[in-house]
Amino acid sequence: MLVTDGINGFWISRLILRVDQIALIASRVMSLVVAGVSLLVAAFGLMKLTVPAVEAWSVGKELFFGAGVVIVVAGSFLMAVWLTRTVEPQAATAAAE
C-alpha cells in the first residue's frame, strides 16, 4: 500500500502542475479511489481483529485480496484515462471560445 500511495502521490503532484480539466478529473478519480481502497483495507483489517468468522474465512485468500486491490487501482487508472479522453474535446472547445 505504501508503494501504491507513493506512486499515486507522485502522479497527482504532476497532475496538479497542469491546470486544465483533464488533470482535475484524473486527480480526483485517482485520489478518491486510493482513499477508498485504503479505508476498505483498514476496515477489513479491523474486522479480522474483531470478528473471528472473518478471520477464519479470510485465511488463505491473501493473494486474492491483493489482486483485488491491484485490479481496483488499475481499473480506476484506466477509468481516469478514459474520462480525460472523453473530456479533452470539450476542454479544447471551451478554451477556443
Image (tube, rainbow, N blue to C red):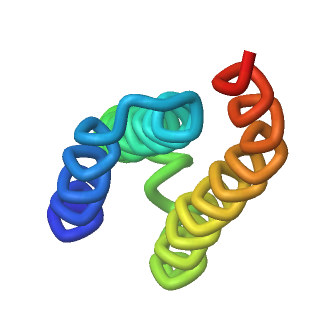
The image position of residue 48, as x and y in percent, is 38, 46
Residue at 53 percent across and 48 percent down: it is: 54
Q: Can residue 93 be seen in this snapshot? A: yes
Describe residue 72's horizontal placement relative to residue 14 as left or right.
right
Residue at 79 percent across and 28 percent down: it is: 93
Of residues 45 and 32, the one nearer the viewer is 32
Of residues 58 and 10, the one nearer the viewer is 10
Residue at 24 percent across and 40 percent down: it is: 17
- Can you name the residue that lies furthest to the top here? 97
The image position of residue 56, as x and y in percent, is 51, 61
- Can you name the residue that lies furthest to the front here? 97
Q: Quadrant of residue 3?
A: bottom left
Give the quarter of the figure containing the C terminus: top right
Q: How many marks?
A: 0
Of residues 30 and 1, the one nearer the viewer is 30
Q: Quadrant of residue 6?
A: bottom left
Residue at 63 percent across and 70 percent down: it is: 71
Give the quarter of the figure containing the N terminus: bottom left
Q: Can residue 51 be seen in this snapshot? A: no
The image position of residue 69, as x and y in percent, is 52, 63
The image position of residue 68, as x and y in percent, is 61, 68
Of residues 55 and 35, the one nearer the viewer is 35
Q: Quadrant of residue 64?
A: bottom right
Describe residue 29's horizontal placement relative to residue 91 as left or right.
left
Tell me if residue 82 comes above or below residue 70 in the rendering: above
Tell me if residue 66 comes above or below residue 73 in the rendering: below
Describe residue 13's horizontal placement relative to residue 39 as left or right.
left
